[in-house]
Image: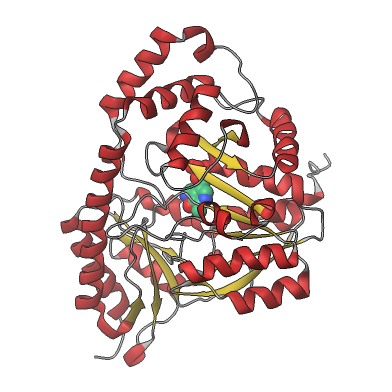
Amino acid sequence: QPAMQFAQRLDHVETSAIRELFKLLGKPGIISFAGGFPDSAMFDVEGLREAAQRALADEPGAALQYGATEGYNPLREQLAAFMAAKGATVAPDGLIVTTGSQQALDLIGKTLVDPGSTVLVEAPTFLATIQCFRLYGAQVIGAPIDAQGVQVERLEELVVRHRPRFVYLIPTFGNPSGATLSLQRRLRILELAVRTRTVIVEDDPYGDLYFGEAPPPSLLALSDQVPGSRDWLVHCGSLSKVLSPGLRLGWMIAPAALLAKATMCKQFSDAHTSTFAQATAAQYLRSGRMPAALQRARQVYAERARAMGESLRQKLGEALTFTQPGGGLFVWARLSGADGALADAGELARRAIEHGVAFVPGAPFFATEPDRASLRLSFATVGVEQIREGVARLKAALMQGTPS
Ligand code: PMP
C-alpha cells in the first residue's frame, strides 16, 4: 500500500513540543503552570445561563438557524460598543465575528500570505500563529522585544529589509512574554505602518486583564491620532479570556477590502460562527454583567501573579530573572545559570514533571533563534498556596544535582 500523501504545505509544520508536554500533565498531583487558559472558576455561569435562556426565549429562530458569515448583528453591535468603551471607534459592520480570534489569525494568513512571503512577529510570540502562518508558506521572522514590547528600530530594519506581508504583534500582556508595548512605541509603530505601507496585525485577547493601572490604549484606539494608520491596521479581539473560551467567539476589525476577502474565506471554512453562541454572548453583553465579571477576574489573577512573583524571587533568587507582569496570564522568565544551576529550560521542564510541577519551555515560541533558557509560567489556574508549593518544587528540580 502506498503511504497516504499529504499536502506539501504541511512539510514545514510540526505539532508543537508543547502538545507533547501536555500528554504528561495527566500525572496525579501535578501542579501545572503550563496552561494557557483562564480559570474555569472565573466563568460567570449564572450570567451565561440566563443569557442562553434569554437567547432561546427571545430569538429562537435566529439563535438556532444558519446565520450571516459576517456575524450576528446584535452581537456585532454589542462588540462595537465594547470596543467604544475602550476608546476604539468601529461601526458594527466594520467588524466580523470569528470562531475564536484563532480563526481571525487563520483568515489573515489565508488572505495575505503566499508561499515564500515574509511575516514578522515578536520574538517570542504565540506559537499557534507561527504555525498557522507557516502553514500558508510564510517565512516567519522574529523581531526582538524587551519589557516595553517590540524594539521599534529593530522592527523597522526588518520591515525595510524583508518587506513583510504584515507584522503580527500582541502589544498588551503578550503571550508568552507578558510584555506591554509602551504608549510611545505604539505611536511609532502606527507611524511606521503608514510610512512603510505595512499591515500591522494587533492581537489583543489579554488587554482587559490588567492588575493595577490600565495599559495604554490599543493600537486601534490610538489610530485616530496617526492619520492614515487605520488603513494598515487589523485588530483581533476575543471573548475567550474575559468570558469563556468554549464559546469560541472572537472578532476582526480591518480595512473594508481585507474584511471582505476574509469574510469570503470564512464562508468556505465554517460558513459562520455558532449563532447560538453569538446570541448568548449578545444577551450577556447587553445584561451589563461583564464589568463586574472582569473586575473579579482581574483581582484573582492579580493576586496569583503577585504570589508567583514573590515566590520566584524568594525561592529562586538569582537563578531566574523575570519582569513582573501588569496583566494577562503569564510570567515569562529566564534561567540565568547562576552558581552552575541548569540554564536549559527544556531539560528543567522534564525534571520538573518528576518533581510534580509543569511549565512550558520558551524555545518553541521563537520563530527564529530560540532562547533555550527561557520559560513561560502561567499563574492563572492555580491558587495562591499551590503557586507557592509549585515554585518550591521548581526549585527542587532546578537544584537537583547542582553543587551546593
Ligand atoms: N491570540 C493569542 C495571543 C492567544 O494567546 C490566544 C489563545 N491562547 C489566541 C489568540 C486564540 O484565542 P481564541 O481563539 O480562543 O480567541
Q: Nearer the viewer, residue 269 or 201?
A: 201
**Count of labels shown?**
0
Can residue 258 be seen here? The reply is yes
Q: Position of residue 379 (x, y in %)?
A: 30, 57
Image location (x, y in percent) of residue 75 = 49, 27
Q: Is residue 83 left or right of residue 94?
A: left
- Residue in the picture at 23% in, 50% down: 300
Where residue 165 appears, as percent x and y from the top left, is 75, 59
Q: Residue furthest left?
A: 385
Q: Nearer the viewer, residue 320 or 207?
A: 207
Residue 19 appears in the picture as rendered: no
**Taking 196 as reference, is 91 above or below it?**
above
Residue 113 falls left or right of residue 388: right
Left or right of residue 12, residue 288 in this image: left
Q: How is the image coloured?
A: secondary structure
Residue under the point 65% across and 26% down: 69
In the image, 284: left or right of 104?
left
- Along the line of sight, the residue nearer the viewer: 384 or 186: 186
Corner quadrant of residue 194: bottom right
| Residue sitting at x 76%, y 50% | 112
Residue sitting at x 53%, y 29%: 76
Q: Where residue 115 sits in the image (x, y, percent)?
A: 82, 55
Q: Nearer the viewer, residue 399 or 66?
A: 66
Quadrant including the N terminus: top right
Image height of 192 relative to 157, above or below: above
Image quadrant holding the C terminus, namely bottom left
